[in-house]
Image: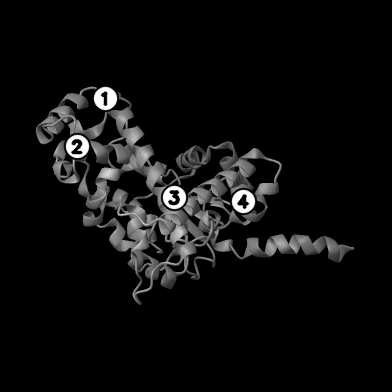
């Protein structure tokens, strides 16, 4: 009987003891012992606020799960996401796999390199110019999420399946009825890897789904934030409108990228908006390579919301930053590295 009682306790304590080097890292007690703290914050829809608040309480380095360390320090960004640093994507990305692994959620370095080289041309300035006119904290739950008695999970799985259905339908339609239309899908279809092989149908559909999610949500969120902060900061609008009117004489025409790419005030407004408003409020996690001071499978991520105010001036409603001058290049460099987080394996 004693052995039977000891077995589950040992099963829980052994992994806990293996993370003794993390013992001194501060954080909520429940977060140190279980993933339930982070899962509860996710379920409330308040994860970003809860983690931000915990950083304010405990400091820059915070333990948000038994094997997950959150860091609110801009200097950690190049260390975590930089090329050749050896930190691979965590199992967090497994929750995003639908159909098959795509560029965003593949965790294998060699496979990611193959995919990235195959689709890189799709996002070149020339390619974008050609179609500018047509403009998880517990991934292990995913296989069972549809059966959980909570709409938070069941609706989420239904939404994933619906988005996958859209991608499947669009790819099938384009392959069955070729079109001269130049867009993201046409470039994905034309993609070739180093051996000259095209993407398979499942892989092509997975990449289309990635663009459907990442390309629409991030753009719409940032556009809404840009509009909000401009309206909340009225003195910005006259100067911005004057610069745009001078660059785009025909007010009824859709401006080309060439017309707006070198407008300094527009550039400052966009960058200041993105500094204040995180498109993703969650740090995308990476697995730290095993080391004496870091147990295997330890996950780390920079905390975007906690970093934003520290990069320059603290954001204030009605006080958009362009009138104070440009955002410092180093700060923007740290922010722009976020664009690499989605498609970079390390």
Residue 251 picture location, percent across and down: 16, 29
Q: Residue at x 35, y 77 (%)?
A: 195
Sequence-first disc among 2 and 3: 2
Marks 1 and 4: in contact by CB < 8 Å?
no
- Mark 1 lies on a secondary structure that is loop
The earlier-in-sequence mark between 4 and 3 is 4
Q: Is residue 25 visible?
A: yes
Q: In percent of the image, x 50 and y 59: which residue is there?
A: 299
Foreground: disc 2 or disc 1: 2
Q: Nearer the viewer, mark 4 or mark 1?
A: 1
- Mark 2, residue position: 266
Horizontal side of residue 7 vs 237, given as left or right = right
Where is residue 5? Give x, y as percent: 83, 60
Check whether the beta carbons of the residues at disc 1 and disc 3 lie within 8 A of each other: no
Say which quadrant the N terminus sits in. bottom right
Sequence order check, earlier mark of 4 and 2: 4
Q: Do the residues bearing badges 2 and 3 touch, measured as CB atoms within 8 Å? A: no
Q: Quadrant of the C terminus?
A: bottom left
4 or 1: tag closer to the N-terminus: 4
Q: Which residue is mark 4?
A: 35
Using the image, tell me which numbered label, if any, was put on residue 283.
Answer: 3
Question: Rounded to the nearest whole Å, what is the CA distance between mark 2 and mark 3?
Answer: 27 Å
Determine crowd level at label 4: few under 14, some 14-19, many 20+ residues with C-alpha closer than 10 A. Answer: some
Total numbered labels placed on residues in the image: 4
- Could you classify mark 2 by the number of other residues whose Cα lies within 10 Å: few (under 14), some (14-19), or many (20 or more)? some
């Amino acid at each position: 009987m004693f052995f039977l009682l000891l077995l589950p306790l040992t099963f829980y304590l052994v992994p806990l003891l293996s993370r003794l080097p993390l013992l001194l890292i501060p954080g909520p007690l429940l977060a140190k012992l279980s993933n339930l703290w982070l899962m509860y914050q996710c379920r409330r829809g308040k994860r970003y606020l809860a983690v931000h608040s915990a950083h304010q309480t405990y400091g820059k380095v915070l333990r948000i799960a038994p094997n997950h360390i959150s860091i609110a320090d801009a200097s950690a960004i190049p260390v975590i996401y930089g090329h050749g640093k050896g930190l691979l994507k965590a199992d967090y990305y497994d929750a995003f796999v639908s159909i098959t692994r795509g560029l965003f959620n593949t965790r294998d370095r060699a496979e990611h390199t193959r995919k990235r080289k195959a689709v890189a041309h799709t996002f070149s300035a020339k390619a974008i110019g050609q179609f500018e006119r047509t403009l998880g904290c517990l991934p292990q739950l995913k296989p069972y999420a549809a059966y959980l008695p909570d709409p938070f999970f069941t609706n989420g799985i239904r939404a994933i399946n619906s988005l996958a259905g859209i991608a499947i339908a669009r790819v099938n339609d384009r392959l069955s009825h070729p079109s001269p239309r130049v867009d993201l899908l046409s470039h994905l279809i034309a993609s070739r890897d180093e051996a000259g092989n095209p993407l398979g149908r499942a892989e092509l559909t997975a990449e289309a789904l990635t663009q459907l999610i990442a390309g629409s949500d991030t753009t719409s969120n940032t556009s809404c934030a840009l509009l909000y902060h401009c309206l909340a900061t009225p003195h910005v609008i006259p100067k911005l409108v004057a610069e745009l009117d001078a660059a785009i004489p025909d007010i009824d025409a859709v401006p080309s990228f060439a017309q707006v790419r070198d407008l300094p005030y527009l550039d400052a407004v966009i960058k200041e908006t993105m500094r204040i408003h995180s498109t993703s409020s969650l740090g995308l996690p990476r697995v730290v390579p095993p080391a004496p001071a870091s147990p295997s499978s330890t996950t780390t991520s920079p905390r975007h919301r906690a970093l934003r105010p520290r990069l320059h001036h603290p954001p204030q409603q009605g006080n958009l930053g362009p009138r104070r001058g440009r955002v410092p290049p180093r700060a923007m460099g740290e922010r722009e590295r976020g664009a690499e987080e989605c498609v970079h394996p390390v």
